[in-house]
Image: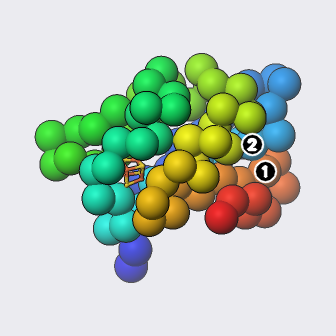
Amino acid sequence: MANQKEYIRNRADSNISKIIIDRDLCIGAASCIAVSGSTFELDNENKAVVIGADTADDETLKMAAESCPTKAILLFDKEGKQVYP
Ligand code: SF4
């Protein structure tokens, strides 16, 4: 099974309700952190973790996911539909 970690998002003005980080895909490039340092951080295995699921607006979160070179950040809407990538 894929090594994926799920983070629930509860922001009222957001259409994104879940962030998944695929830890197998993450190479610790940290571009997600450069875009949204309040959302992402590297853990002691050099893999991204979500430290603040609700801090960024949808646009910033999408930009952070798009910045990931390995597409390790997956975004889902309220209906559970994958909206990125
Ligand atoms: S940009 Fe992608 S590969 Fe880099 S730390 Fe973030 S999730 Fe991992």
Residue drawn where x is 32% and y is 68% of the image: 24
As rendered, which of 24 and 17 lies closer to the eye?
Answer: 24
To which residue does mark 2 refer?
A: 16
Per the image, label 1 sits on a secondary structure element best described as strand
Dot 1, crowdedness within 10 Å: few (<14), some or many (≥20)?
Answer: some
Side (left or right) of 15 relative to 63: right
Q: Position of residue 80 (x, y in %)?
A: 76, 58
Residue drawn where x is 40% and y is 74% of the image: 2
As rendered, which of 43 and 30 lies closer to the eye?
Answer: 30
Q: Position of residue 65 (x, y in %)?
A: 57, 49
Q: Position of residue 58 (x, y in %)?
A: 74, 34
Q: Which part of the image, by quadrant, shows the N terminus?
A: bottom left
Q: Which mark is residue 69?
A: none
Residue drawn where x is 66% and y is 32% of the image: 60
Q: Are marks 1 and 2 in contact (CB under 8 Å)?
A: yes
Which residue is at the far bottom? 1
Residue 50, quarter of picture? top left
Number of callouts: 2
Dot 2, crowdedness within 10 Å: few (<14), some or many (≥20)?
Answer: many
Q: Which mark is residue 77?
A: 1
Residue 71 visible to the viewer: yes
Side (left or right) of 41 relative to 5: left
Q: Which part of the image, by quadrant, shows the C terminus?
A: bottom right
